[in-house]
């Protein structure tokens, strides 16, 4: 699935670049960039957001991941153009400008992808948990998040085992199987994991009791993340880009051809 | 306030929320991969599974705010762990708030059908808000929203089926002696 | 250190007490082993000591439980756990953190210790259990023995006065089991009270100061370990054997058996995508009967099972069943595999449906009636006929294990591979599984057993296939030469 699995040893050599940026900074950038890209509707401000976010994404130095993400955007864009062609065949009121107005939604999508990919692919999941602890989040946020993160890899292995057992018994898990026997296939994958979830909840709940979770109002984080100068600088840079894009939006506005239908 | 909330859920209930959030994520991801991505059956099944687990989880943790917490946790981890889009975050939170309100209106989470009503409202609200957010993202060319509509529609159909399978799963868990109340 | 006085306990919804009239003492520096058939009340006894009963499970308790001289009724589970540490069968299931260091610090963080104090405590404990070199490792990458040590290390970082171990050897190989036994002796010598609930007994010979045999919620026997060597006691209470021979090195090599091989492999090579070579041009035969797959952890036992079932593709090589070369599809059709975790392999609504689905999938039965009859026969073979209508997930561990093996039998395989089929099972359940395997082997099927259970191995395995396998065997020469390779 991704680098989050590089929890220990294998992740040790990954450092520098966005890997060393504090997760809290990346989280703020992701949220701020996403909100501003939705709020802004001008072509040039959008291009500005897209360009800087692309540089941000490129700095994670993961060409393959970026290529896959962009291939997906282009695929959706191509699909949209085909749809537009079909719609225009039946609804003559749609103008040719509709095609150019496709640009902004896809720039917006690309900007969002540009900021979410570094968050997901340059963050060790261990530091997510450390960050949550450092923030001294209440137990009711920290505990479910920690449990979810802890058990995703375990459940992936479980599902693989379920699928392999099914394969040995003579059930082929294929897309066709999901179409021809959806109920059986769902049951086959779903029931073992449902029961496993219930048992895990029970066992882990007991372990939590025994470990004294929730006993004290406060916990002492054993490790905490260190906020560095780079993190501040990268946040300032992001804020500047957003301010400039917003200013451009106010000054230049939205070109006529790009405006949505009433 | 925080302390009050902390005491609202037991440690075991918080663990149930985390474990079910993980199971929901893994199962929907697996179905998407095994089913070959964006085909309609896969879209339907993903939603059936998610809603079923959601219903079972709400039957296990019958407390106000559980739906909201489950949604927030799922979204937060999906975003940081798997690169899920930020766009669906407000839709999920808004839907969860509405779902919580209907659970409250149905007499509280302890009432027999309250979790089902809550999830039904959640599913509908999530889709409606998703359409609105899609419009917001694609407002320069609203025709694009029509492209998303079938996906949202199929998803909602899956969620509706998931309501029934959720109730059936709870019954089966009672038969297996795992859920008693 | 641990003292139970006239304790009886009934779970909520329980119709009768899970344990009754229990009087028990575990002194500092003493190891007490508690054993008994499945459902005898061992787990409840553990829960009473660590406070989960009644503080967590509720229910009704009469009598008193004293920990370190104080009545546990007045304490919370977390307070009790600071005095008595608990380690469960699968420690990984109780891990919250992603790496060893964080896991060891976890409980201390929530108990309000200062950062420096936490560091001092966990590193001291890690040193005691020899795990300082894996402190930064992922919890997903630990061996079963390492998980156990991490679990113990986490418990001991909290400086308990007593420790409870629930089925500690169920997932351990004999070497890790011996290591655990030595560690327990060290703890005992340092004045820790140790309470162990386990089905496997042999590893505590000469170590346990006292044994308790539970039956139907009551202490049926209390005395010295030597008393188990009287076969009657074990037979009467469905216990495992207190003395077990390690046949891994003495068992006949399956390459030396008489008769035609049932399953053969020729020139098999396999490497993982990482490039690690597991098998290099190896050839071997597996005769009909029960064969133990023997080798150290990580040597390729599971990989061989995957290759033989067609789950993983070889880089090169051929497989033969009864002398006929078979492709991947025939391997799939002819092989059955029972994995360790029974829960993953059960998905229908009733035990009968579970077997019937497997019979349908095998494609060997046409009519519904034939399927029902065959399913009934299989359930009977595994003494599950009275449970046919029960939900598979509501069965006990031993019953589930028998059901998944019945499902594998339903495929009518030419080769059946079982991965740890008896871990965590009592003597009676182990014998039932052994008997069913013998029945199948008697029908000419090759049964390959991957197990750490020396007792099961001793009971059913006629020969062993030892890994690592040597490369480049000349099969023609082999037929006339039985002196080995």
Image (cartoon, rainbow, N blue to C red):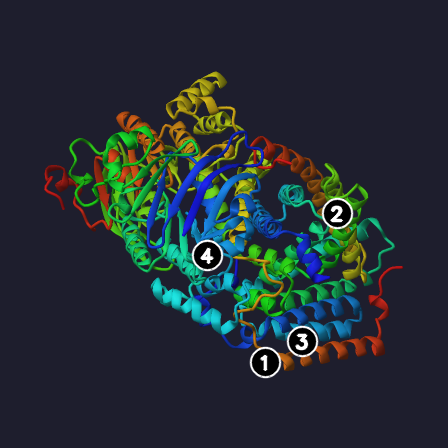
The reply to whether residue C183 is in sight is yes
Residue C30, image x, y percentages:
33, 51
- Mark 3 sits on what residue? A52
- Mark 1 sits on what residue? A228
User: In front of the other: label 2 or label 4?
Assistant: 4
Which image quarter: residue A253? bottom right
Q: Is residue C470 left or right of residue C168?
A: left
The vertical placement of B63 against A10, above or below, is above
Residue lying at 54% horizontally and 57% vertically, measured from the top left: A212
Q: Secondary structure at mark 2?
A: helix
Residue lying at 52% horizontally and 44% vertically, measured from the top left: C53
Q: CA distance from mark 2 to mark 4?
A: 46 Å
Chain letter of mark 4 equals C
Residue A104, image x, y percentages:
76, 66
Name the mark on residue B122. Answer: 2
Residue C362, image x, y percentages:
43, 28
The reply to whether residue C143 is in sight is no
Badge 1 crowding class, 10 Å Cα cut-off, few under 14, some 14 to 19, many 20 or more, is few
User: In front of the other: label 1 or label 3?
Assistant: 1
- Mark 4 sits on what residue? C83
């Amino acid at each position: 699935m991704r680098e989050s699995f590089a929890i220990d040893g294998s992740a040790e050599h990954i450092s520098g670049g966005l890997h060393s940026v504090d997760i809290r900074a990346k989280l703020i950038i992701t949220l701020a960039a996403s909100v501003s890209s939705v709020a802004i509707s001008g072509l040039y401000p959008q291009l500005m957001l897209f360009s800087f976010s692309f540089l941000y994404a490129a700095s994670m130095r993961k060409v393959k991941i970026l290529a896959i993400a962009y291939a997906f955007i282009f695929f959706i864009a191509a699909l949209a153009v085909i749809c537009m062609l079909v719609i225009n065949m039946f609804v003559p009121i749609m103008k040719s400008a509709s095609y150019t107005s496709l640009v902004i939604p896809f720039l917006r999508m690309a900007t969002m992808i540009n900021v979410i990919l570094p968050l997901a692919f340059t963050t060790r999941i261990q530091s997510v948990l450390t960050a949550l602890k450092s923030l001294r989040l209440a137990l009711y946020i920290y505990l479910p998040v920690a449990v979810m993160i802890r058990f995703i890899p375990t459940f992936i292995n479980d599902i693989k085992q379920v699928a392999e057992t099914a394969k040995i018994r003579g059930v082929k898990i294929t897309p066709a199987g999901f179409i021809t026997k959806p109920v059986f296939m769902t049951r086959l994958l779903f029931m073992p994991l449902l029961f496993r979830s219930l048992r895990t909840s029970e066992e882990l709940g007991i372990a939590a009791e025994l470990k004294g979770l929730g006993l004290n109002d406060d916990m002492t984080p054993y490790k905490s993340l260190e906020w560095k100068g780079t993190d501040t600088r990268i946040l300032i840079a992001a804020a500047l880009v957003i301010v400039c894009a917003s200013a451009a939006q106010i000054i230049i506005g939205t070109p006529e051809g790009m405006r949505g239908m009433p | 306030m925080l302390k009050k909330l902390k005491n609202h859920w037991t440690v075991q209930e918080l663990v149930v929320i985390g474990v079910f959030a993980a199971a929901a994520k893994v199962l929907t991801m697996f179905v998407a991969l095994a089913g070959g991505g964006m085909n309609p059956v896969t879209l339907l099944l993903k939603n059936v599974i998610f809603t079923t687990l959601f219903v079972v989880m709400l039957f296990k943790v019958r407390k106000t705010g559980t739906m909201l917490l489950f949604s927030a946790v799922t979204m937060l981890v999906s975003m940081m762990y798997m690169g899920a889009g930020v766009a669906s975050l407000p839709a999920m939170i808004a839907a969860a708030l509405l779902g919580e309100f209907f659970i409250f209106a149905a007499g509280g989470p302890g009432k027999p059908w309250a979790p089902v009503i809550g999830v039904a409202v959640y599913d509908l609200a999530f889709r409606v808000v998703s359409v609105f957010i899609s419009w917001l993202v694609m407002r320069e060319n609203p025709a694009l929203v029509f492209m998303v509509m079938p996906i949202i529609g199929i998803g909602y159909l899956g969620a509706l089926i998931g309501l029934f399978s959720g109730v059936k799963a709870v019954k089966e868990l009672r038969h297996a002696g795992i859920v008693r109340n | 250190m641990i003292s139970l006085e006239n304790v009886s306990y009934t779970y909520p919804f329980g119709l009768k007490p899970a344990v009754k009239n229990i009087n028990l003492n575990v002194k500092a520096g003493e190891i007490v082993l508690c054993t008994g058939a499945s459902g005898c009340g061992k787990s409840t006894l553990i829960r009473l000591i660590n406070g989960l009963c009644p503080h967590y499970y509720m229910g009704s308790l009469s009598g008193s439980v004293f920990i370190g001289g104080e009545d546990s009724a007045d304490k919370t589970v977390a307070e009790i756990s600071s005095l008595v540490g608990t380690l469960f069968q699968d420690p990984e299931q109780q891990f919250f953190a992603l790496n060893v260091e964080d896991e060891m610090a976890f409980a201390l963080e929530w108990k309000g210790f200062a950062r420096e104090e936490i560091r001092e405590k966990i590193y001291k404990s890690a040193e005691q259990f020899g795990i300082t070199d894996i402190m930064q490792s992922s919890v997903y990458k630990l061996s079963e023995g390492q998980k156990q040590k991490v679990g113990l290390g986490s418990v001991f970082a909290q400086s308990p006065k007593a420790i409870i171990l629930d089925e500690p050897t169920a997932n351990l190989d004999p070497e890790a089991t011996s290591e655990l036994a030595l560690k327990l002796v060290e703890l005992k010598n340092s004045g820790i009270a140790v309470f162990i609930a386990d089905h496997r007994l042999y590893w505590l010979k000469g170590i346990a100061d006292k044994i308790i045999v539970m039956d139907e919620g009551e202490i049926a026997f209390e005395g010295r370990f030597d008393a188990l060597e009287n076969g009657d006691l074990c037979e009467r209470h469905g216990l495992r054997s207190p003395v077990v021979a390690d046949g891994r090195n003495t068992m006949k090599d399956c390459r030396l058996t008489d008769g035609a091989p049932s399953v053969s492999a020729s020139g098999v090579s396999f490497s993982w995508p990482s490039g690690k070579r597991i098998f290099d041009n190896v050839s071997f035969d597996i005769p009909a009967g029960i064969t133990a797959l023997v080798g150290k952890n990580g040597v390729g036992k599971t990989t061989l099972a995957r290759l033989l079932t067609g789950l993983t593709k070889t880089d090169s090589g051929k497989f033969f069943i009864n002398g006929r070369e078979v492709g991947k599809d025939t391997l799939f059709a002819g092989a059955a595999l029972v994995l360790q975790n029974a829960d993953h392999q059960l998905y229908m609504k009733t035990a009968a449906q579970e077997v019937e689905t497997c019979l349908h999938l095998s494609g060997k039965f046409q009519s519904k009636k034939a399927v029902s009859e065959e399913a009934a026969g299989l359930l009977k073979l595994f003494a599950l006929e009275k449970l046919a209508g029960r939900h598979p997930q509501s069965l006990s561990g031993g019953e589930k294990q028998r059901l998944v093996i019945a499902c594998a039998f339903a495929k009518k395989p030419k080769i059946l591979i079982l991965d740890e089929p008896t871990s965590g099972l009592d003597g009676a359940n182990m014998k039932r599984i052994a008997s069913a395997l013998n029945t199948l082997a008697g029908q000419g099927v090759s049964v390959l057993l991957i197990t750490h259970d020396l007792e099961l191995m001793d009971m059913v395995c006629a020969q062993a296939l030892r890994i690592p396998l040597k490369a480049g065997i000349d099969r023609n020469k082999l037929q006339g030469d039985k002196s080995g390779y």
